[in-house]
Image (spheres, helix red, strand yellow):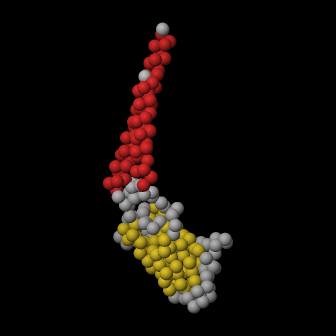
Amino acid sequence: MRVAATGASVAIIAAITIFAPLIASAQTLTMTSGPFVPIADENAGPYRLIVQQSPERVILGTLAISVQVHDVESDASIPDAIVRIYGTPAEHGNRQVAPALNSPQDREYYVGRLEVEETGVWAIDVAVEHPEYGAANLTLAAEVFNRSRGGSNLLFGTILWILVSLVFIGVVWHLVRSSRKTRAKLQDVRTD
């Protein structure tokens, strides 16, 4: 009986050892935990707008937009502007608005978050207002993709998910089977 339990434990450890590199190499889905990626550095009216997004590959969920607002002539940062980010799906859906706020610790970056709920191309509008400089808009495009289990390769992610599920089911089956055998042994000992 000890040999069967040890063999099952070795099989479980072997399965985990075999699948651990696959699990570690699978591309993780990040929402806004990753770094911001530059998507635009353009002049809009009296402003130079540097726009970044996170994640790099936009998937359904939260899209974070970071905007740096500079004066075109002096290239000085403008820390007291009013920045709004609008997201509109190209196909159909409602326009969203997100105020982009900066923090007292880092007044150069205005960050806003949009909840993107439709796949396809989205129009991202960055609207900036300031009492001294005036108003300006910058329109960008972002393509939103469906989520996949393994990053960009859906087949690899699905196979990995199935293998991990089978290992989990095997562990549960082993535990149930060994507890039944132990319970039966205890029952035999009590009846003797």
Q: Where does residue 149 sit, x and y in percent of width and height?
A: 39, 54
Left or right of residue 148: residue 86: right
Q: Where does residue 116 sit, x and y in percent of width and height?
A: 44, 65
Q: Look at 64% across and 73% down and name the residue there.
A: 106
- Relative to 166, say whether 62 is above or below: below
Asked if residue 14 shows in the view, the reply is yes
Left or right of residue 191: residue 70: right
Number of marks present in the image shown: 0
- Relative to 189, say whether 182 is above or below: below
Q: Where does residue 99 sit, x and y in percent of width and height?
A: 56, 72
Q: Where does residue 133 sit, x and y in percent of width and height?
A: 59, 88
Residue 184 or 97: which is nearer the viewer? 184
Query: Among all residues in the image, which is located at the extreme left?
Result: 155
Q: Look at 37% across and 45% down and name the residue there.
A: 163
Q: Look at 46% across and 17% down and name the residue there.
A: 185
Query: Among all residues in the image, which is located at the extreme right?
Result: 104
Q: Look at 46% across and 75% down and name the residue there.
A: 39
- Relative to 187, say whether 97 is above or below: below
Asked if residue 176 shows in the view, the reply is no
Left or right of residue 171: residue 78: right
